[in-house]
Structures are given as C-alpha cells and as structure tokens.
Image: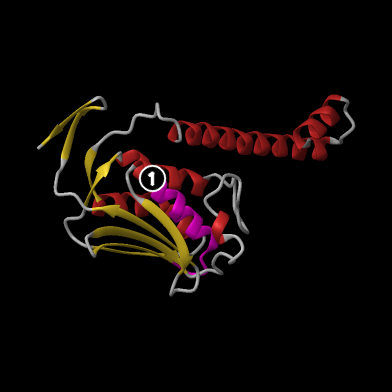
C-alpha cells in the first residue's frame, strides 16, 4: 500500500519536489525490504524441501566462528557492540559450511540488534555433544514469545522479516542438530545449537559424491 500510494501520487503529480523525492526513497526502501522477504521465503522453502541438496564436508568450527565475526564486525562497530568468542580447539562439524555460516550469521545479527553492549559466541564439547552458543546482554525474549520464536514471521522488538530464525532452525535441523532458545547469564537471549560429535571427516568432491577419509 505504501508503494502504491506514493507511486500513484507521483504519477498524478500531487506531491511537491521535496515530497516526491521522499516518496521515491520510500519506494526504493520498501522494494528492497520486499525483495529480502521474498528471497528468504524462497530459501526457507528450499531448506524445508526434501529436494534440497546439502553438502557434506568437514567444517572447522573455529574458522566458522571467525567468518561470522568478520562479517558481523561492521554492524557491531556501528552499534558499538563488543563481540567476544571462545571456541574449543579442534572442533569440527559435518555439514554445509555456507548454510551453517548463514544460520550463525542470522543469530549473530539478531543478537547485535538486541544487545546493549555485548555479543558472545561460545563453542565447546559437553557430554558427548558439540554446542555453539550465541548470547547477548539485551532485554532477552519474552516468555510468551519463546515457544513461537522459530516460526515463520514471528519476530520480537526490532525484528526484520521474521524469517531469519526460522531459516537458522531449518539449517541446524538439516545438519542433524537442534536449536533452542533461553535466557543468557548476560541478561539477554541465549541460542544454543547442539550437534552430535563425529570422528569422521568428509572431503567433498562435489555435492553428489562424498568420499570418507
């Protein structure tokens, strides 16, 4: 309705020059927002489809977390959010590195948006499982929203499309793990990703042909 209203107003020349320029800026902004929603809906549909092909490769968790921090740094710096990481050595996942990176980036961007001063990523082995925890020191997630937070189009305060957490959930589950949300000791939200530990490393030749080494 916003796009239609401004477009019709500009077409009918009911705006002055300043209002017309503002209208064009709003149209561009809304188009970009809709494009992001559509792209994320398409990705989520693919992730939840049995036809989706996930690569199986050995992924260094330390390298994965470093990539997340590198990509999140500009946004964190802009919002004056300190990022911390603590990753146990020699942790590996068997999965699709690009998809796992997307899942962690969604969680990290979400944490940065809601954090007051700090975002923390921790990875460790515990009771035969590998855990990755993303937490912040913001207001946290309300109790009534927690059971629905991974559903499509559910978003809290300052949320964007309401699809990012649903995408993260789908990627984690496709990798054989699970994702949970709770309250962080820092004061904000705590997202915990849990995966089975495997000693096998897979070297991918192509997405349809995996060699176990």
Foreground pick, 78 / 175: 175
Write down the region rendered in magenta: 102-118
The x and y percentages for residue 144 are 61, 63
The x and y percentages for residue 25 are 70, 38
208 vs 33, left or right, is left
- The quarter of the picture where residue 28 lies is top right
Could you tell me which residue is drawn at 33 percent across and 56 percent down?
Answer: 194
Position of the C terminus by quadrant: top left
Foreground pick, 200 / 190: 200
Could you tell me which residue is drawn at 50 percent across and 55 percent down?
Answer: 110
The secondary structure that dominates the magenta segment is helix
Q: Which residue is mark 1?
A: 173
Q: Give the SS element for disc 1.
A: helix
Position of the N terminus by quadrant: top right
- The answer to if 36 sits in the magenta stretch is no
Vertical comparison of 6 with 199: above or below: above
Foreground pick, 5 / 193: 193
188 vs 123, left or right, is right
The x and y percentages for residue 3 are 75, 33
């Amino acid at each position: 309705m916003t796009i239609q209203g401004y477009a019709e107003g500009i077409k009918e020349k009911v705006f002055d020059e300043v209002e017309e320029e503002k209208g064009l800026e709003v149209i561009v902004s809304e188009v970009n927002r809709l494009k992001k929603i559509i792209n994320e809906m398409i990705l989520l549909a693919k992730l939840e489809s049995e036809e989706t092909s996930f690569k199986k490769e050995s992924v260094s968790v330390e390298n994965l977390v470093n990539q997340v921090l590198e990509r999140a740094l500009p946004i964190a710096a802009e919002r004056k959010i300190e990022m911390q990481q603590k990753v146990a050595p020699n942790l590996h996942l068997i999965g699709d590195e690009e998809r796992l990176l997307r899942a962690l980036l969604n969680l990290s961007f979400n944490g940065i948006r809601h954090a007051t001063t700090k975002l923390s990523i921790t990875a460790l082995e515990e009771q035969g499982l590998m855990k990755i925890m993303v937490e912040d020191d913001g207001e946290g997630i309300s109790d009534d929203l927690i059971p629905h937070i991974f559903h499509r189009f559910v978003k809290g305060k300052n949320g964007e499309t309401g699809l990012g957490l649903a995408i993260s959930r789908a990627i984690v589950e496709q990798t054989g793990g699970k994702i949970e949300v709770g309250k962080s000791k820092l004061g904000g939200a705590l997202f915990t990703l849990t995966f089975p530990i495997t000693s096998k490393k897979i070297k991918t030749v192509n997405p349809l042909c995996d060699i176990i080494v």
